[in-house]
Image: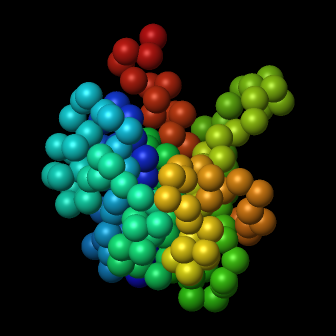
Amino acid sequence: MLTIITETRDNEAELAQTLSALVAGAVEGLVSDVIVLDHASQDGSSRVADAAGARFCSSWDMTDIVRSARGDWLLLLEAGARPAGRWIDDVAEYMSLNKMPARFSASRQYRRPILQRIVNRPAPLELGLLLSKQQAAAIAKSSMQLADFANGRAVRKLGSELVPAWVAIANRPDAE
C-alpha cells in the first residue's frame, strides 16, 4: 500500500489535478491514503482535499505525519504533478522488488525550454519521490518540508513518467 503526501499553498486547482490523477491508484488498491500538508492557503484547497477523501493538515510535525501514514511506502508529490501512463503497475512492481528510493521519469511531452533546463535546477520533488515509510521515518525531523526528503538522496528511475507541477501552474488562467 502507498501513501501520497503533498504540500500546498494556494494551489487549489493544481491540487485538484493531482488528486484526480490518483483516483485510479485508489480504485486499483495501490493508494491507501493521501495527506495534504497546507502552508496557510487562502483558497479552497481544504475543500478539494476533503472532497477527495484526503487528510488535510494545516499544522503538523513531519515525524507524526510519516508515522501516521497507512502505506508501507510514501510517494511525495508537488501539488499539480500527475503520474502518467502505467504508473500504478510500475509503482506496485517497484515497491515489491526494491528497497531504494525512486523518482518518476521526466515527461517527454512536457519539457522546459533548453535554456531553462540549463540555467535553473529542477525543484527537488519535480519528479516526485517514492521511498519506504521506514526510510522516511529514519530521515524525518519535526520541522522538515517534503522537499528535504529528496535532498542528496540516491534514487532509481521508474519507467513511468510524471507530468510536473509547473505544467499545471503555467496553465493557470491567472498565469498570463
Q: Is residue 11 visible?
A: no
**5 lies above or below 121:** below
Q: Is residue 134 above or below residue 118?
A: below
Q: Quadrant of the C terminus?
A: top left
Looking at the rendered structure, the number of numbered marks drawn on it comes to 0
Q: Which one is nearer the viewer's eye here, 137 or 46?
A: 137
**Left-right relation of 100 to 140:** right
Q: Quadrant of residue 168?
A: top left
Residue 153 in the image: state x and y as whole percent: 74, 62
How far from the left and from the top, in percent, is residue 102? 66, 67
Residue 160 falls left or right of residue 36: right
Which residue is found at the position 37% from the left and 15% from the top? 174
Residue, x 26% and y 59% (percent of image)?
A: 55
The residue sitting at 60% across, 38% down in the picture is 110
Q: Residue at x 37, y 50 (%)?
A: 37
Task: Find residue 141 and report its horizontal and vertical position in percent.
Answer: 55, 61
Dividing the image into 4 quarters, which one contains the N terminus?
bottom left
Q: Is residue 46 left or right of residue 169?
A: left
Q: Relative to 93, say whether 24 is above or below.
A: above
The picture quadrant where one finds residue 139 is bottom right
**Quadrant in which residue 34 is drawn:** bottom left
> Could you say where residue 82 lies in the image, as x and y percent from the top left?
46, 50
